[in-house]
């Protein structure tokens, strides 16, 4: 599958924030409000489209890819590029995650090749953790919030 990315727009942001995942991934459901719109339109998010130009997912980098409680816990030392990603609910579980993840990784490394990558994932999301491990990411740190336990995973050679 061929992907392209583009800057986030208000229209696409609203669509993404209205995506609804089924349990247990409903943890990732959002709402359209001033705070979520402000974050997703802050310039750190990019929309990803498939070859038919349909919205397929998104990714973000920097502080937007970090969980605030993790910053308080000190699990985000400097020297990494933090990134996060999401796929349209209808595209999940179809075996397309590897291609999507590989595309995002190439995109980020094409812009900032000098630093290793780091991501944060909820520990219940075994499907995502397996994917990240397949790409050479290793569990680094764990922290808890009132809602979930998270792992940071870093790219290891």
Image: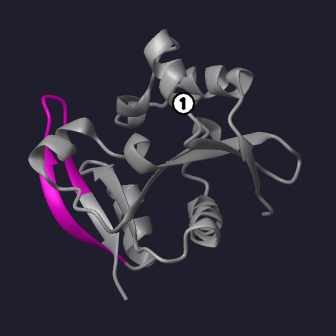
- Could one spot residue 145 in this view of the protein? yes
Q: Is residue 50 magenta?
A: no
Is residue 116 placed above or below 153 in the rendered structure?
below
Is residue 35 placed above or below 152 in the rendered structure?
above
Q: Left of 153 or right of it: where is 109?
A: right
Q: Secondary structure at mark 1?
A: helix
Q: Left of 22 or right of it: where is 59?
A: right
Quarter-of-image position of residue 106? bottom right
Residue beneath the point at 69% across and 22% down? 10
Q: Position of residue 67 (x, y in %)?
A: 28, 41
Residue beneath the point at 54% across and 30% down? 40
Q: Residue furthest right?
A: 52
Q: Which residue is mark 1?
A: 40
Q: Residue furthest top?
A: 33
Residue beneath the point at 18% across and 38% down? 69
Quadrant position of the C terminus in the picture: bottom left
Q: Secondary structure of the magenta portion, mostly?
A: strand
Q: Position of residue 141 (x, y in %)?
A: 16, 62
Q: Position of residue 126 (x, y in %)?
A: 32, 56
Residue beneath the point at 64% across and 71% down? 110
Q: Is 112 or 58 nearer to us in this picture? A: 112
Q: Left of 35 or right of it: where is 97?
A: right
Q: Is 54 or 11 nearer to us in this picture? A: 11
Q: Which residues are magenta?
A: 137-151
Quarter-of-image position of residue 107? bottom right
């Amino acid at each position: 599958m061929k992907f392209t990315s583009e800057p986030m727009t208000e229209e696409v942001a609203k669509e993404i924030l209205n995506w609804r995942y089924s349990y247990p991934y409903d943890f990732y459901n959002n709402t359209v409000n001033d705070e979520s719109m402000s974050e997703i339109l802050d310039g750190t998010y990019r929309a990803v489209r498939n070859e038919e130009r349909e919205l397929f997912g998104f990714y973000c980098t920097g502080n937007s890819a970090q969980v605030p409680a993790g910053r308080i816990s000190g699990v985000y030392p400097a020297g990494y590029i933090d990134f996060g990603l999401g796929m349209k609910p209808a595209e999940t579980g179809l075996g397309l995650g590897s291609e999507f993840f590989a595309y995002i990784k190439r995109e980020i490394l094409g812009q900032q090749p000098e630093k290793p990558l780091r991501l944060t994932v909820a520990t219940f999301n075994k499907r995502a953790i397996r994917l990240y491990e397949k790409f050479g990411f290793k569990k680094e740190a764990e922290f808890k919030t009132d809602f979930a336990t998270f792992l940071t995973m870093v790219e290891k050679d």
